[in-house]
Image (cartoon, rainbow, N blue to C red):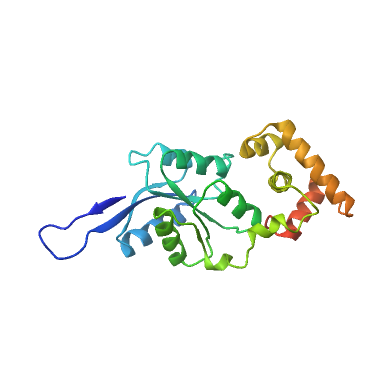
Amino acid sequence: MSQARGGGDTGTAPVTSIRVGIVDDHRLVLDGVSAHLRFRHPDLQVVATETTWVGLLQHPDFPVDVAVLDLGLGDDIPVETKIRTLATAGTRTVVMSRHADAISVQSALQAGAYGFVPKADDATELVQAIRAAAAGVPYRANSMASLDVDSLNRTTPGLGRQELRALMLFATGRPVREVAEVMETTEETVKSYLKRARRKYRAVGVDLGTKVLLRRHAVREGWIGPE
């Protein structure tokens, strides 16, 4: 973070400036968020607005202090990969999304995002999340207070953490290859997780043997949002 200093002895403390990059493939959203931050919050210095994640990486002012990243960019790059790449460059991430289902939140936070803000929330939530991320403090929007992501590991029939994560990622429609990439393991290991998870559900009378059945279950459990 940089510090903006006024000329002469004004008797005021220096203002800490947080360099922000915003990525959203909807230009109206991108322009609206950047304008709000620029004109209402002088401590938030928007230095990059891009419609693609790659565009942010290639921006001359990258790396930034905090990246505000739209979850649904539709570029087939796992959000976990994006967050970890940004972290390697020294950039902390706040994810914003149209959906705030459990699997989206869990995936983003486990990958290292400092905050998750639904797009339906007030802009104040995003501002607070950016400032918290810049300070290295995790932030969860007030609208998500009732979403107990940790409870996902307690409401399943004896699934291990990796079995549950593989099942939830697969339920989003990702291929096994992509699930393996996100989990940083092999495709064979992911297949083993899925097989064991389905067997444990079957033992308690829940059939998740097809993608259709798995998706229906995922929607009922709040892992993913309905279409």
Residue 125 versus residue 152 in the image, above or below: below
Residue 86: give x, y in percent of width and height: 46, 41
- Quadrant containing the C terminus is bottom right
Q: Is residue 19 something that shows in the picture?
A: yes
Quarter where residue 14 is shown: bottom left
| Front-lying residue, 75 or 105 | 105
- Numbered circles on residues, count: 0
Residue 17, percent across and down?
30, 55
Residue found at x 33% / y 58%:
38
Is 7 in front, or is 135? 135
Residue situated in front as seen by the camera: 140 or 137: 137
Task: Classify residue 19 as left or right of residue 14.
Answer: right
Can you give x and y, in whole percent of width and height, for residue 193 in the image? 76, 40
Q: Is residue 227 visible?
A: no
Q: Is residue 224 above or below residue 91?
A: below
168 left or right, relative to 124: right
- What residue is shown at x 36% (from left), y 60% (from top)? 37
The image quadrant that residue 81 belongs to is top right
- Name which residue lies at 66% across and 34% down: 185
Q: Residue at x 85, y 45 (%)?
A: 199
- Residue 11 lies left or right of residue 113; in this view the side is left
Q: Position of residue 116 (x, y in %)?
A: 53, 57
Q: Furthest-left residue in view? A: 8
